[in-house]
Image (cartoon, grey):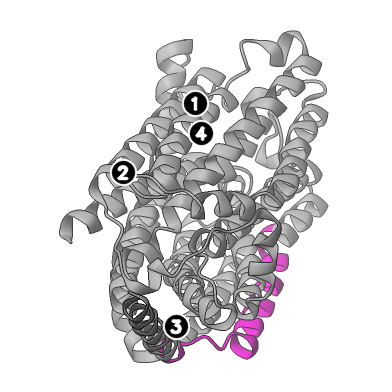
């Protein structure tokens, strides 16, 4: 089992390094390096609008992608073929996105927008296959809640290191490759620097997927054998009839959006409020260390106060972090302290949501009579993509309307611009978090105890049906 845990953690490491790069730093690349000078704000707005619109349209296909994964039957399982193909294509797509597409961004913006749209659609589709197949492996690795918690924990441990590791290496890598390939000096960022950074992340994502591909194994049991092919016309019905999945999904969407927006705008805070973009790298070091501490604590804490306590209590702690953010001003030290309090519960809240979604596979099977692993688990990636799409648009809107674009300096930001920025990075996310906690507290009833009862009922029912079926076959013979 140790090999499987490690392999799953490595896959999560590469996967979330990719996710953080795409959803947090692509908007920064577009506004700071890809388009500069006259018309840069308009061009950046077109690209980010395309990203948001394409993702919103493609989100409707995520449950269908989950259905395709559920219906896959190969010698190596139903998840691994999509995991590998998705990793290869999405990594290439990420590298192309962090480029000028062979100079088209300068020579012909109209053609650039067209080609970018094609590249992004292909990348996003295959990223969805990888995302859904990777995380929907959880219910296939075990039906036991404790074992699932371990896989979820090591997976989140890896993903935390991956996403926070990007914060640590992004500026050093961008500056290094800028100096290496463009001959710049100091802290100047160039397109070549961002491209080099994207190549590194693409390789990390692919290597992580290969580790999971070769190092994990699906379990076989009576509950998993009770699986029928999912018709595409039924995938949304499967999700819609699972009330616990729907309520959890709404709560998690508000939580994810608030976190991603604040996290994405922090680099702007260090650059334009504190006036020291390099100091942002320390955030990655702080959160990586906290992730190492926080994630392993999840099984211990959840055994004491349950997932509900982790989810709602963790959000309360994040709100304390937001209060400190508002008093940080231009102090980097205060920002580090506030971000530490804000971030510490985040991995555990994610795990609480992930394990509730995973348990809703059996809940849906018990309630509706059919088992749909990937369709059910596709909801979590779908929500993350939705949050990422909205956050990309919000980040650009916040940057443009706050005056934080191109070659702007901290002294150029007006008081009104600063108020707009604070509204996007702090005030709006705080409201979303409060609503998220209230929904989970009063609408999500699928506890660990209830899931264990459902599993016992399913096993008893399926065993009875199997016994009756075997007896009927023997009598006929």
Magenta span includes 420:
no
Which label is found at residue 90?
4
Label 1 close to label 4 by CB (< 8 Å)? yes
Mark 2, other Cα within 10 Å: few <14 / some 14–19 / many ≥20: many
Front residue of 67/122: it is 67
Mark 4, other Cα within 10 Å: few <14 / some 14–19 / many ≥20: many
Residue 403 visible from this viewpoint:
no
Question: Which stretch appears magenta?
Answer: 425-450
Q: Does residue 48 appear left or right of residue 286 in this picture?
A: right
Q: Which residue is mark 2?
A: 213
Q: Is residue 279 above or below residue 66?
A: above
How far is disc 1 from disc 4 in space, using C-alphas? 5 Å
Observer-side mark, 1 or 2, equals: 2
Q: Which residue is mark 1?
A: 92
Q: Does residue 355 appear left or right of residue 102 in this picture?
A: left
Q: Which residue is mark 3?
A: 307
The x and y percentages for residue 28 are: 62, 37
Front residue of 177/450: it is 450
Observer-side mark, 4 or 2, equals: 2
């Amino acid at each position: 089992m140790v090999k499987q845990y490690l392999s799953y953690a490595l896959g999560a490491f590469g996967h979330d390094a990719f996710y953080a790069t795409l959803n947090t730093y692509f908007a920064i690349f577009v506004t700071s390096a890809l388009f500069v000078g006259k018309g840069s704000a308009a061009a950046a707005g077109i690209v980010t609008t395309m990203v948001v619109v394409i993702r919103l349209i493609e989100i409707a296909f995520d449950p269908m992608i989950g259905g395709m994964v559920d219906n896959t039957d190969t010698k190596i399982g139903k998840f691994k073929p999509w995991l590998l193909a998705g990793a290869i294509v999405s990594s290439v797509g990420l590298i192309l996105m962090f480029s000028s597409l062979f100079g088209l961004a300068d020579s012909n913006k109209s053609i650039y927008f067209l080609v970018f749209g094609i590249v992004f659609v292909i990348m996003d589709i295959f990223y969805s296959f990888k995302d859904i197949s990777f995380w929907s492996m959880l219910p296939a690795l075990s039906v036991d809640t404790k074992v699932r918690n371990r896989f979820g924990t090591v997976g989140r441990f890896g993903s935390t290191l991956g996403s926070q590791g990007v914060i640590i290496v992004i500026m050093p890598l961008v500056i290094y490759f800028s100096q290496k390939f463009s001959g710049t000096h100091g802290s100047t960022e160039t397109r070549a620097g961002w491209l080099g950074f994207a190549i590194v992340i693409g390789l990390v994502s692919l290597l992580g997927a290969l580790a999971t591909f070769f190092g994990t194994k699906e379990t076989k049991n009576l509950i998993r054998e009770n699986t029928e092919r999912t018709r595409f016309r039924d995938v949304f019905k499967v999700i819609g009839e699972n009330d616990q999945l729907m309520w959890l999904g709404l709560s998690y969407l508000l939580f994810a959006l608030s976190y991603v927006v604040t996290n994405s705008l922090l680099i702007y805070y260090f650059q334009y409020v504190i006036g020291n973009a390099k100091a942002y790298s320390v955030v990655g070091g702080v959160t990586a260390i906290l992730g190492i501490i926080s994630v392993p604590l999840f099984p211990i804490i959840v055994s004491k106060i349950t997932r509900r306590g982790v989810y709602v209590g963790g959000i309360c702690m994040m709100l304390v972090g937001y209060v400190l953010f508002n008093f940080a001003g231009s102090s980097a030290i205060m920002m580090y302290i506030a971000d530490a309090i804000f971030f510490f519960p985040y991995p555990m809240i994610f795990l609480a949501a992930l394990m509730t979604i995973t348990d809703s596979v059996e809940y849906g099977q018990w309630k509706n009579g059919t088992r749909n692993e990937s369709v059910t688990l596709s909801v979590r990636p779908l929500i993350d993509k939705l949050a990422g799409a909205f956050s990309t648009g919000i980040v650009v809107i916040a940057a443009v309307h706050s005056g934080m674009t191109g070659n702007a300096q901290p002294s150029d930001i007006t008081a009104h611009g600063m108020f707009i920025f604070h509204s996007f990075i702090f005030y709006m996310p705080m409201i979303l978090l409060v609503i998220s906690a209230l929904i989970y507290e009063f609408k999500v009833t699928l506890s660990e105890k209830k899931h264990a009862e459902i599993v016992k009922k399913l096993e008893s029912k399926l065993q009875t049906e199997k016994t009756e079926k075997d007896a009927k076959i023997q009598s006929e013979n």
